[in-house]
Amino acid sequence: MIESNTKQNFAPQHSPEKIRRFKVVFISLAIMVAAVIQFVWFPWFREFADTVQCQNYLWFDAEVNGAGVMFYGLFVGIPAMFASIGIGMFLLRGRKILRAGQDPLPGEKVYFRRRYVFGMTVYAKALLPVLLGVFALMMAFWGYGQAGNILAETNWSQINQACIAGLG
């Protein structure tokens, strides 16, 4: 553990060349992901959303059509995804931070000037993703009931007639 009152209270930094390389790679990947989302996923989703109530999926009950998949995905899938990200962040790095009792970890290089942090702040930084993950998991459980209630209150007879008539 590094004493906070010495001259070594800043973590070592990556070289400027490595920082530039990281930025170029990160920006390139972000542009590629944005292009795939814009030109592949959005057109597919627009087409899907126009006829979502008329879609049926074999892996769900006969009562759940495309609208059910969308509602459950929105109210359960998205919070569950954030829960897995938050808990995964803790499993990857948070445990090491708790064990070492400092952040950044000993010998870890950082991309910008950062002081070593000790004490309760370290525990808060390490456990915050878990707390957010647990909150998101609770939202997913709550969303499961809400999606079921919304689908139960929907008048499917009018929607099914529109699908048969080819309006949906």
Image (spheres, grey):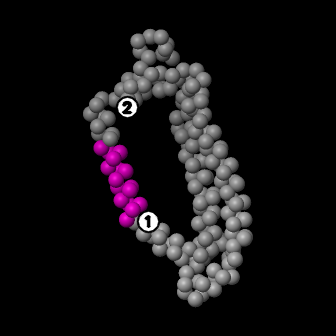
Identified at 59% across, 30% down, the residue is: 124
Q: Quadrant of residue 160?
A: bottom right
Q: How far across and down, in percent of the image, does residue 119 sit?
A: 58, 21
Q: Nearer the viewer, residue 3 or 27?
A: 27
Judge the density around disc 1: few (<14), some (14-19), many (≥20) Cα neighbours within 10 Å: few
Q: Quadrant of residue 154?
A: bottom right
Residue 77 higher or lower than 168, as above or below: above
Q: Amino acid at mark 2?
A: Tyr
Residue 17 higher or lower than 25, as above or below: above
Circle 2 residue: 111
Quarter of the image with the C terminus is: bottom right
Q: How far across and down, in percent of the image, does residue 123 sit?
A: 59, 28
Residue furthest to the top in view is 6
Q: Nearer the viewer, residue 154 or 43?
A: 154
Q: Quadrant of residue 130?
A: top right
Q: Amino acid at mark 1?
A: Phe
Q: CA distance from mark 1 to mark 2?
A: 34 Å
Magenta-drawn segment: 24-39
Residue 162 higher or lower than 92, as above or below: below
Circle 1 residue: 42
Q: Nearer the viewer, residue 152 or 63?
A: 152
- N-terminal-most mark, 1 or 2: 1
Residue furthest to the bottom in view is 165
